[in-house]
Amino acid sequence: IRYADSKGWYDARVEPRAPIALDPAAAVLHYAQEIFEGLKAYRSADGGVTTFRADANARRFRESATRMAMPHLSDDLFLGSIRELVQVDRDWVPTDPEGSLYLRPFMFASEVFLGVRPALEYLYCLIASPVGSYFAGGVKPATMWVSTEYTRAAPGGTGAAKCGGNYAASLVAQAEAIEQGCDQVVFLDTREQKYIDELGGMNIVFVLDDGTLVTPPLTGTILPGITRDSVLTLARDEGRAVQERPVSVDEWREGARSGRIRETFACGTAAVITPVGAVKSRDYEFSIGGGEPGPVTMALRERLVNIQRGNAEDPYGWVQRII
Ligand code: PMP
């Protein structure tokens, strides 16, 4: 779908995937005015297709657009584009119970203009790709690398927006985590490098010895994860205490040692919920819950996956049938 300041959104169409021609002076190539989303479509038992909280992705897409000085896409256009593409690509939605169709909506500044100001023309696109289970051969606890050299987002920055630039800036830290034999980088706050913000592509949640869930608050430097919100909702509804408050690396380390922090998990669309087994940094290394997936983590994971896949009742109206 194209956008021009003078006429709004126009020219919506579904077409075979092919390269896009861009003028070398297209604004996105210079100033990174680009945002995106990530969500999945699931095959239901009767052969239909559903999405999970796509309306929340539509809302976050608009919030990202606001932060990046871009136009808003209505729910009608955002959700409608998903319905239309999935209709056309319905045979690509995997039928195996672990698979799904990953959906990637994105929007970028296409105006041919080298001055630095918000562009007046944009292109919104949606592409899809079938994905299998994130954990082939069962859920495995992940290892985290706490970056002391790089941070992700400063107060007042773009941390809460899902914009390409955030990921460009985090690549070097994520590559360092992989070099160190870890799966994901943990970013700390930019002011004191003391409090935990989030991971390269996931939010983080701690489980205390009394069953309380603790997670860093949405203060503008972390992405408001839809999985994070779903997990907190499920936990509150099963009577768990939930605290959204800063957690320092010292609290994490000391809590893992004393047993006050029993479990830690990462959450996001790709892997839903991933137990964290070990943590490393330049100066220390520790394990959590003996490196094994914790019971609260795994119970929340099962509950959420069952709702997403239509195998459990959905009291929240999170699952929307699109075919
Ligand atoms: N933080 C970051 C930096 C991410 O890229 C993601 C993945 N979108 C998340 C958190 C988790 O968000 P969600 O649960 O909406 O996938």
Image: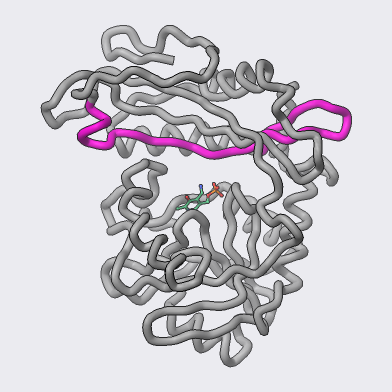
Q: Report whether 183 appears left or right of 140.
A: left
- Residue in the picture at 48% in, 22% down: 74
Q: Is residue 268 magenta?
A: no
Residue 23 image-quadrant placement:
top left
Above or below, comparing residue 110 to residue 154 in the picture: above
- Residue in the picture at 29% in, 25% down: 109
42 and 220: which one is in front? Answer: 42
In the image, the segment drawn in magenta is: 27-52
**Can residue 320 be seen at all in this image of the molecule?**
yes
Above or below, comparing residue 114 to residue 217 in the picture: above
Q: Report whether 268 appears left or right of 305.
A: left
Q: Where is residue 174 in the image (x, y as percent from the top left)?
A: 41, 61
The quarter of the rendered structure image containing the N terminus is: top left
Q: Where is residue 145 in the image (x, y as percent from the top left)?
A: 45, 72
- Residue in the picture at 34% in, 59% down: 172
**Can residue 229 be seen at all in this image of the molecule?**
no
225 and 144: which one is in front? Answer: 144
Residue 209 image-quadrant placement:
bottom right
Above or below, comparing residue 89 to residue 139 in the picture: above
- Residue in the picture at 42% in, 32% down: 62
Q: Report whether 25 appears left or right of 127.
A: left
**Which residue sits furthest left?**
115
Above or below, comparing residue 277 to residue 312 in the picture: below
Q: Does the magenta stretch include residue 31?
A: yes
